[in-house]
Image (tube, coloured by chain):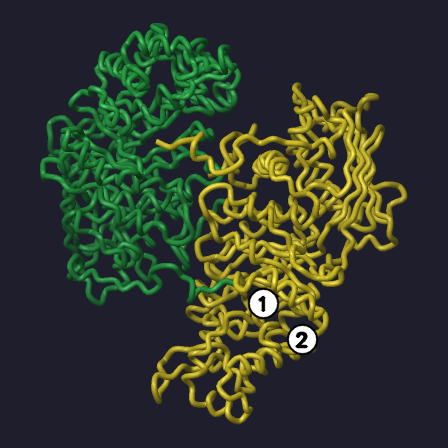
Chain colours: A green, B yellow
Amino acid sequence: MYCLLKCAPLILAVAVCHGWLFGDFVGKQKELDEISLWPLPQKFQSSAVAFKLSPASFQIVHAKQSSAGPSCSILVNAFRRYFEYMFGDLKKHEKSRKKVYDSDLAELQVWITSADPECDGYPSLQTDESYELSVDEPSAVLKAANVWGALRGLETFSQLVYRDDYGANNINKTDISDFPRFAHRGILLDSSRHFLPLKVILANLEAMAMNKFNVFHWHIVDDPSFPYMSRTFPDLSQKRKGAYHPFTHVYTPSDVKMVIEFARMRGIRVIPEFDTPGHTQSWGNGIKGLLTPCYSGSSPSGTFGPVNPILNSSYDFMTQFFKEISTVFPDAYIHLGGDEVDFSCWKSNPDIQKFMVQQGFGTDYSKLESFYIQRLLDIVAATKKGYMVWQEVFDNGVKLKADTQIHVWKERPQYQDEMAKVTAAGFNALLSTPWYLNRISYGQDWVNIYKADPQNFTGTDAQKKLVIGGEACLWGEYVDATNLTPRLWPRASAVAERLWSDKSVTDVGNAYKRLVQHRCRMVKRGIPAEPLFVGHCRQEYMGL
Amino acid sequence: MYCLLKCAPLILAVAVCHGWLFGDFVGKQKELDEISLWPLPQKFQSSAVAFKLSPASFQIVHAKQSSAGPSCSILVNAFRRYFEYMFGDLKKHEKSRKKVYDSDLAELQVWITSADPECDGYPSLQTDESYELSVDEPSAVLKAANVWGALRGLETFSQLVYRDDYGANNINKTDISDFPRFAHRGILLDSSRHFLPLKVILANLEAMAMNKFNVFHWHIVDDPSFPYMSRTFPDLSQKRKGAYHPFTHVYTPSDVKMVIEFARMRGIRVIPEFDTPGHTQSWGNGIKGLLTPCYSGSSPSGTFGPVNPILNSSYDFMTQFFKEISTVFPDAYIHLGGDEVDFSCWKSNPDIQKFMVQQGFGTDYSKLESFYIQRLLDIVAATKKGYMVWQEVFDNGVKLKADTQIHVWKERPQYQDEMAKVTAAGFNALLSTPWYLNRISYGQDWVNIYKADPQNFTGTDAQKKLVIGGEACLWGEYVDATNLTPRLWPRASAVAERLWSDKSVTDVGNAYKRLVQHRCRMVKRGIPAEPLFVGHCRQEYMGL
């Protein structure tokens, strides 16, 4: 048998205190339960005054003063999406009730204030995602500089709507002024250890938008498989063992486009990672001579190591390859990897040994690694892209462009020290160490995920400002379409709030209460987010 | 970044040796990969001679000598189910190709040998699940004493079919003689901590049949909720907080019937657990006075403890309640729980204190617990049902019927000692301790699950024979419809093989290789079984 009362590892009795936030809500527990904003907005004022919303008459409209109009497909798509989240399938609601009563909220006006609403643009690291939302009769007003802030505000508005005891849609008088604490709030998915069907990627982009994430870090290829279908080098995925299967287990150019557009519609950047010189076993099948031949004694063993750093052909290939990548992916950044280079194969190879002597590297193979990375960075810089790299590249002292983003992931030495070092050197830093969500343990592990803070290290204010955010990483060894989504959500939601909300939002009891409701909201919207603990959702997941 | 090569916790290179089993298969790796029987049959001989199966002409038929015929719905349903597993949707295959070629396998004849095929019966602890399967031209023959063995054999036959390089269905010449090592091979699901929609329960019964499990231990109610809708005491689920919701979060009598019938069709027994006197918080909402009022000093605190053992009304209720249960559930056994009784509430109550004195129990509250259980067992025995209990009931020295099944679950003292004690006392023992699959850890935890053996304790042969099997338990604190199925499968498959196959089947490398294929087979059949490690399935899961 299994004990509930004795073994429950955490938070059984949740003592919640939201007085400071929800001052007007004392004695209104019911509405509060329903609201449960996630992530918590920066500034929030609400009152017990409630308005009714009728699906038959309520509208989301462009404000008259707005620089965006009906041709702004990002907003039109978002209006439809959020209307459906709030009221269900449009078709179910006959437009029979036209009269708007006094106590009704008639509409939400979306007001884009800057001259260019960016309807056809892409979000970027510099994007202003702030918004202001005022819910009052007869209209609610959502004000943002551009579509990206409007998307965040629409999510918040949809979270404010709740059903009363009669099943009627309500929203309370509310004022919100909101903006993200960090500019880079990402999720890494790994489509190499296991191929992830498009459907799974799109569903997770949906869930990301519900949590105000704005970067999809697509770790698209790695040792086990190369599912990215390259136009320039189709053999990379088409040759045996490049991709798991050349038709069923690849992302075609059209698939990639769809992912990027689907993400754009939700204010999410897509940053692809093409990790070299290590983690490239799958590249070797399609490109002869790209990888280093390993030696056993004086003859080649038949196995291969990292990209061969001593051949011009390797750099010619990278030049062409990253030229394609820089065109296919619109984001200003590419993740170049650069982690975990195993030197044993390089060490075994006599040509590499000779090269080491020529270059005066002695026996320090990290110098050879840096030599490769340096040339690669120059190649990528020529495409006008910025780059992200894993922390080893910085640790090895490679010369980096000033705007390089260093991705911290190692547990040792303490990640706080690494964050301090990276920022002391003047580089942008991104944190992932405490957010390797592929690692699982029994019980409520979201609490430690929630408690980690990327600015929690010893450093100056200037250093802290160089922290641009973080990413939750779900490496693919043990996940595929069968279990990825519930393993990621709502654990990644804990990261979402850490990266969006104010630094002071750290009350685990309050977070638990809101997150329970938020995960039920995700379930209602079709995302199989797993439960935090014992309990139920009004509407349980209806898939399998 | 995340390392594949350095951190892979287990079994990267799988050195497989199946010479002893698949002697004829040397150099035929391809077919072997496809076959991957799970759980491994007791006796198995195969050859490289392959026959083709045409979905347009192949048939599963009753053998002429069979005691079962077209009116045997269990078999008719199973023929259809396995035909679809092997060849996909029936409708897709036009019956255009009638001619049977020489190299074809024309049919599978199912031959039930005993006079009563048990078409309308229920499986039981005594059921003979053995079968013999011979695949040779022109017909394969599956021979079993009754439908239950035939179901197991049909699963095996379906696992033998594989596709060759041309996509054609093949099966090799094979002889199998098979039977389970243990008679009780169960899965426990908990529908109280989280409500499990019917769809989830049925899907898991499907998966159980694919793994030759034969007992669904339905831990249907517990402290958090009472979703079982009782005809005699409807208030148990209908009153506020009995079930999570009286309509959407209950199992109606019709739902329960459907579960039992769906399970019967797959040779699976349904054993409900109604755990008392502890774990009964949810019972108290519907039945006034059933639970013990706890005291704070000299006055009731307003909270309640276990079932009140000193009132005749408690026993009157149990008499009526278990009379219903014994009718609703056809199985010969009911699980009565009896675990983890917290004495603090009893100790606080002055009426209970008085009763303890009257009975001469001193301050030993385990005597009071035994007093309750003893009366409960008498009540249930009067319904002619056998019972299963958690080990505490045995540990406390309650007088038990000879055929009582003691369910071992505690980690301390070592479960091996408990298994030895229980069997030394002459009782049937069931093991679950190493198979609490709700407990998760990072990496390939199926290996330790696989290695545990219920007969691995010090005892006589007679004692070993009293071990009737075991159960994989998935307690519901952290699982619901969103994540239950991939968390259970294929980890529970490791338990399935341990309980079915010969004791000597312990090669983890060989098991890994077969289990990888078996989980892909489950995925292909619509079960979102999670991956064991890096890799892919020919057909990935298409749900979300």
What residue lies at 70% left-to-right and 39% top-to-bottom? B82
Above or below, A495 relative to A193? below
Q: Secondary structure at mark 2?
A: loop
Res. B491 image quadrant: top right
According to the picture, the residue beneath numbered tag 2 turns out to be B400
Q: Is residue A214 visible?
A: yes
Amino acid type of disc 1?
A: Trp
The foreground one among B135 and A70 is: B135
Above or below, B362 relative to A357? below
Res. A262 image quadrant: top left
Q: Is residue A78 visible?
A: no
What subunit carries mark 1?
B
Above or below, A123 relative to B362? above
Q: Position of residue B147 (x, y in %)?
A: 78, 50
What subunit carries mark 2?
B
Q: Position of residue A435 (x, y in %)?
A: 32, 41
What residue lies at 70% left-to-right and 66% top-to-bottom? B332
| Mark sitting on residue B143 | none
Residue A235 in the figure: left or right of residue A417: right
Count of all numbered marks drawn on residues in the image: 2
Residue A71 in the figure: left or right of residue B520: left
Q: CA distance from mark 2 to mark 1?
A: 12 Å
Amino acid type of disc 2?
A: Leu
Q: Position of residue B229 (x, y in %)?
A: 54, 66
The foreground one among A362 and B14 is: A362
Residue A189 in the figure: left or right of residue A116: right
According to the picture, the residue beneath numbered tag 1 turns out to be B390
Dot 1, crowdedness within 10 Å: few (<14), some or many (≥20)? Answer: many
Q: Position of residue B171 (x, y in %)?
A: 74, 29
Res. A271 image quadrant: top left
The foreground one among A446 and B234 is: A446
